[in-house]
Image: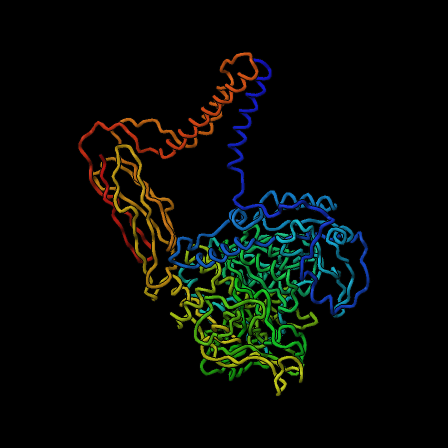
Amino acid sequence: MNRNRFSCCAAVILFSLIGISFSFAQSSVAPRITRSVSDSDVALVPGGVHPQVARAVDQGSVSPNMPMQRMAIFFKPSSAQQSALDQLLQQQQDPNSPNYRKWLTPEQYGERFGMNPSDLAKVTVWLQSHGFRNVTVSRSRNSIEFDGNAGQASAAFRTPIHQVQYRGETHYANTASPRVPAAFAGAVAGITSLDNFRPRTRPIAHLTSNISGNHFLVPGDVGTIYNINSLYNSGIKGDGQSIAVVGQTTLTMADDGTHADIDRFRSLAGLPAINLTFQKTGTPTYSASDVDEANLDLEWSGAIAPNAQIFFVYSDNALFSSLPYIVNNNLAPVISISYGNCEAAFDASSVTVLTNILQQANAQGQTITAAGGDAGAADCDTSDPATQGLAVDVPASTVYVTGMGGTTFTGDMTATFTCNPQGSTNCIADADPPYWSGSSSLTDTSATALEYIPETAWNDSDSQNISATGGGVSKLFSKPSWQTGTGVPADGQRDVPDISLSASPNHDGYIICSQGSCQNGYRRSTNDSNNNTFNVIGGTSAASPVFAGIVALLNQKVGTRLGNVNPMLYSLAASTPSAFHDITTGNNIVPCQTGSKNCGANGMLGYSAGAGYDLVTGLGSIDVGALTSAWTGGGTGADFTLSANPTSLSLSRGATGSSTITVTATGGPLGGSVALTCSVSSGLGTTTCSLSPSTVNAGQTSTLSVVATNSAALHRDRLPGHMGVELSFGLAAVCFIPFGRGRRGAWLLRNLMLSALGLVLVMGMFACGGGGGNNSNNNSSTPLNGTVTVQAVSGSLTHSVSIPVTIN
């Protein structure tokens, strides 16, 4: 064979093989960057300046060499992708949908709702051309992180980076909305970390002491009050579960991975050693106020789910660095967030970015709990009197998060204490009814709550301080379809909170160990400046990790991730109200400056609690035992049916047949998973069966495979997968067919034969494409008849379906 012919043949073989490989490598997501990328053709990314920049004092440009790390470009789904995502999120919570609880991995999310890899490559090249380093594409293909400096950021995004003073704090920030090449501007949701404004931490500290007779909450108290003990008593303690805590500081000055405060807390509470994993992203620094928040979240999420693994993900921005890391790496099925800010403190692009992150989390089955704010109905205000009007907190006000409100215990308000001798720790309570134990044998570390204690809305505000549960009507998010029920306002907007738990630091706060506070039991050292007191904290940021721990227990009980739990919460509030403690008293009304926005004539602003849902405590607090029972079908009349399609099978000997088994919930959501097994009647000989998967949830399907008994050899299958190889070798064979020396005749004959062979092979591919394993030689004339039975079990519920099978 001459050199030209060899080259031609090699090209044909290579092209055919590459073509086959390429057909498998293409993304199902259509490219969105179809124009050339040019810095001379740019477009604005609207709403990309932090709102507080307008109220800050501009101090001029920062040094162009100032490092700016872990900036990120986030991409939004196309309109078609967003529509499909909205539909999937609804179906994942619908027990009768085939997509019920079919959670995605980050890669699956990216394949359906992310960017085309070729688009990401173009953006990556553009970023690198501007000198950015460590350019990293997320697993979900919806963001690219990168490092650089202020000069590079300013030049690339056409925006000044200035130093600004806001409320006595120094920050850097872009002072104009960024611009990007027009070729990919339409796909960009926003660019994060062009400023270092950070979300607010929430814990409200109050130092107290039971020497005076005051109470505080240790893990055993919360277990009793909210009936979590019923789960502990049945062995549900978070085994096999994990919770990711969103952080914004190193835990110690040295950032050495130690956690002595947490170890001390768990030891005093009688809990096992914590399974704690640190994950740092970016360059976080030590912040004393954030450390108290971190210890609160880590200690109390782990206290409620004592056997769960806890991840502490910390960075220099809780919402736009720590949270995306957790979601893009699908780190844990439960996420606790105690950081946020009022809606007006977020620019439009940041809202879009955050919404996309939370949607991805829900699609992956991740449940997110978030503090609802501690400034009552005036979430934008930090001091008394309020001047900014009614406001709610992000991310609690988003549709994809369970927003947490706060309550205060009222049942022991009339309690009196006798301490003998005066000032000692030997205090006996005199209360009616006795919600707290008054035994003289109690110590500082003892759990003293005896039962559920009635609650009212948390509001400790006074003439100097705003301190009350957040709640109200969102200005950014529309009302989701699941937010219905008695008391839910017909306002067309998302209302918060969803549920509430104890939050008052005064009555009764959560004990924590932080920054060496627990030196004498839970108390500080007698030589400490706070003199033998407890480190007690309240606020809705305490409710968030507590509920995160509860969700981890629910996950273990149900046997799967739960995703966005809000639809189920509102459904159960209607069907099983006994699982909730309806809070009908109290308010989140705070003083406001007369004449300011939303301020009433009486100088007050806010809402009052009432029957059913309200804008103060949401659906109320919960009885965890009753809620779990209702969730898993106990007492709700929930059941399921089992069906097969096709309903019968007729097979040749040795052949394989299949039937789709569908589990459908009836009478209410089926909380637990369904275990499937199959069996073959004796009349079918050595016929076997199998199910894949063998465990499903209501609304999902499993494939029953039946392999008929074999008494003869099978024909060789010809599967479609062989065709690519056959095509390659077929094309290669043409190259060795002898041709005449005339160039035109040889070229024409070769191409005619290539075309003819290609057509034959393609026709053969379609003809053989339906192959599988059903062709066999059958020398037996006596058919076999019997049944294959599929049995399904979920808790105490058992159902079965039988499929008649004939083997010829």
Which quadrant holds the N terminus?
top right
Measured as percent of width and height from the top left, residue 552 is found at 48, 59
Taking the image as shown, residue 341 lies to the left or right of residue 709, namely right
User: Which residue occupies 26% across, 34% down?
Assistant: 652
Depth order, front residue of 769/164: 769
Residue 717, relative to residue 411: is it above or below? above
Q: How is the image coloured?
A: rainbow
Taking the image as shown, residue 108 lies to the left or right of residue 600, namely left
Tell me if I can see residue 411 in this picture: no
Which quadrant holds the C terminus?
top left
Question: Which of the 4 image quarters holds residue 15?
Answer: top right
User: Which residue occupies 77% across, 66% down?
Assistant: 165
Residue 216, relative to residue 183: is it above or below? below
Q: Residue furthest top?
A: 741
Measured as percent of width and height from the top left, residue 791 is found at 29, 50
Measured as percent of width and height from the top left, residue 297 is found at 58, 63
User: Which residue occupies 55% across, 46% down?
Assistant: 30
